[in-house]
Image (cartoon, rainbow, N blue to C red):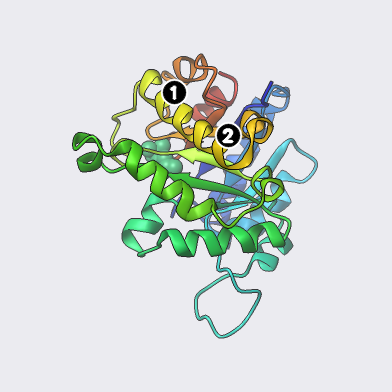
Amino acid sequence: MRRPLMAANWKMHKAAGETRAFFEKFKPLVERADHCDIVIAPPFTSLAAAAEAARGSNISLAAQDMHWEKKGAFTGEVAPGMIRDAGCEYVIVGHSERRNFFYETDDSVSRKLAAALDAGLTPIVCVGEKLEEREAGATELVLTRQFFGAFSALTASQFSRIILAYEPVWAIGTGRTATPQMAADAHRLLRKLSDERFGTEVAHNLRILYGGSVKPDNIKGLMAQTEIDGGLVGGASLDPDSFAAIVNF
Ligand code: PGA
């Protein structure tokens, strides 16, 4: 049995005060949620407030991105060790907004991945097709390219430490969710690729999250698919009641 994981991606929302207020309301709502892992990814500047607020709770923290170098002249960037130091156990890598607005490539995703693993972080790696790619029947091709682009340099033991997130770009922030069936099909493909490249046991244990307009009213249907091991939630994670309802699906 794979343990479910519910991750909140706050994107560019919530300064430190709003972060503290969120945790105050959210913590009691999920304190008995021992059926799944809970991860929150605030913006960098709110990590300290989140770490303080999450101390002693069942909530772990993630960064939304990082650089692959340990230190150096990279203005504006944050290193893996700094993220660890700020209290993160996880880091989101290759989110479609990073790929589309900030020109991240499969190559930079793969470098970040290796650096995250090196620093003892658990990477949550995002893949997913755009609308025109789905409509052109290219979903499988795109996911396969992204999969090998990100993971071909990893050993099976490294790969066993990552979490995958399938996020169809057309479903992110649009209110248009993939049907549980569509998501499960994509997850099955990703698990098949994992099996071929890294072996059956590693593939079986791999957690694959679905992301893209996950809401309290569709999480149950998604989680009913055995292929779906959790959610990566943007908009609906900003409100403590809404994210708690997702965690307690
Ligand atoms: P959304 O975002 O839930 O607002 O669609 C998901 C994501 O980008 O991870």
Foreground residue, 140 or 99?
140
Whether residue 52 is situated above or below residue 178 in the rendered picture:
below
Q: Position of residue 158 (x, y in %)?
A: 68, 50
Tell me the distance, in whole angstroms, between the alpha carbons under discs 1 and 2: 16 Å
Expressed as whole percent of the image width and height from the top left, the position of residue 210 reads 47, 32
Q: Which dot, 1 or 2, sits closer to the camera?
A: 2
Residue type at tag 1 = Ala
Which residue is outermost to the right?
56
**Residue under circle 1?**
184
Q: Quadrant of ligand 1?
A: top left
Q: Dot 1: what SS? A: helix
Give the residue type that dot 2 points to. Answer: Asp
Report crowding for label 1: few under 14, some 14 to 19, many 20 or more residues within 10 A (C-alpha). many
Q: Nearer the viewer, residue 148 or 89?
A: 148
Residue sticking out furthest to the bottom: 73
Which residue does the image show at 63% across and 45% down from the upper left? 162
Residue at 58% across / 26% down in the picture? 247
Residue labelled with disc 2: 195
